[in-house]
Image (cartoon, helix red, strand yellow):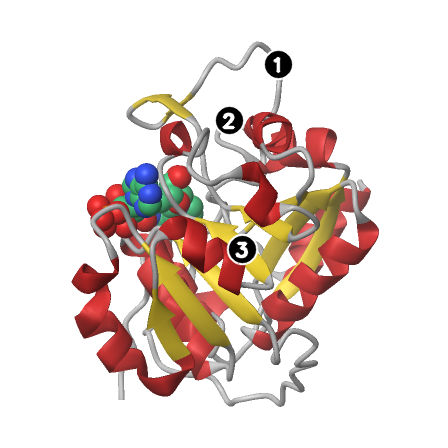
Amino acid sequence: MRARIPRELHPDQVGLDRHGLRRPDRTRTPLSRGASMRTGIIGTGRIGTVLARILVAAGHHVVLANARGPQTLGPLVAELGAAASAAHPAEAAAQAELLVLMVPFERVRGLLPPRVVQDKVLVDATNAFGGPGAPADLGGRGSSDLVAEWYPDAQVVKSLNTMHFETLAVAGTAPGERLAHFTAGDDVKAKEIVAGIITDLGFAPVDTGPLHSGGILQQPGGPLFNRPLTEAQALAWISH
Ligand SMILES: NC(=O)c1ccc[n+]([C@@H]2O[C@H](COP(=O)([O-])OP(=O)(O)OC[C@H]3O[C@@H](n4cnc5c(N)ncnc54)[C@H](OP(=O)(O)O)[C@@H]3O)[C@@H](O)[C@H]2O)c1
């Protein structure tokens, strides 16, 4: 059976040969370090919906929030089953142990009361664009630096922002070498938690360093943005 090759992904990177046929599978051992965590996903558009689906498929619980209200999330919650629920953003943030921001970057400031994310891991998966495909001019600052400024008591980790949603949907369960997801942040424990979830999803976590310097590598205009790399390629790139 031929498998579909997602956009922006070379067949070799999802375990397909150049004809789109699956190569033999390999064994993966999920660490499940984050499996008992309830993840809040704020933003359930293209990328947020995909993340919800693959987290639930990996055995995680999710609480979802969007701009239009939880009543609009009924079909997605029904599709995902008992592991999913919907709430308003601040409620979702309060219920979740870990939060992922998947809204337009311009919506992040003021999105949540800072006290609800106090001491929580806040994964910033947003990207700041100044125009179609062009990075925003942030005067040399990282967009996640700003997120950390707006939510000073959260443990901000920039992650899950570099991969196209169509790739995220399929690449974690495809045979072959794992693709990398990057983590940038100043709190080592928070990065480990995010790395556990990345592993559960079938990807390889690769640490890019502190929030500022690592975040700049990962954001639009940076060398790791929208560039699917295998774990080996990513590690080689980081260490060179
Ligand atoms: N698309 C990708 O492949 C991809 C990959 C990596 C990272 N990202 C980043 O992820 C973010 C979302 O991208 P997307 O493509 O998924 O966008 P999208 O399809 O337009 O979805 C945006 C989501 O954000 C929600 N939202 C907007 N304002 C909100 C608010 N004030 N409170 C709560 N929810 C709000 C929207 O709610 P409604 O549904 O109610 O309108 C929608 O669910 C962007 O920052 C993007 O750069 C995208």
Q: Are marks 1 and 2 in contact (CB under 8 Å)?
A: no
Question: Which callout, 3 or 2, points at the residue further toward the start of the chain?
Answer: 3
- Check the picture and name the quadrant holding the C terminus: top right
Ligand 1, what quadrant? top left
Question: Which callout, 3 or 1, points at the residue further toward the start of the chain?
Answer: 3
View extreme (top): residue: 139
Q: Position of residue 110 (x, y in %)?
A: 44, 31
Marks 1 and 2, Cα distance to the nearest angstrom? 11 Å
Which of the two discs, 1 and 2, sits closer to the camera? 1
Q: Quadrant of residue 152?
A: top right
Q: Secondary structure at mark 3?
A: strand
Q: Which residue is mark 3?
A: 99
Q: Position of residue 88 (x, y in %)?
A: 34, 54
Q: Secondary structure at mark 1?
A: loop
Q: Which residue is mark 1?
A: 140
Q: Which residue is mark 2?
A: 221
Q: Position of residue 158 (x, y in %)?
A: 61, 43
Residue 147 left/right relative to 196 = left
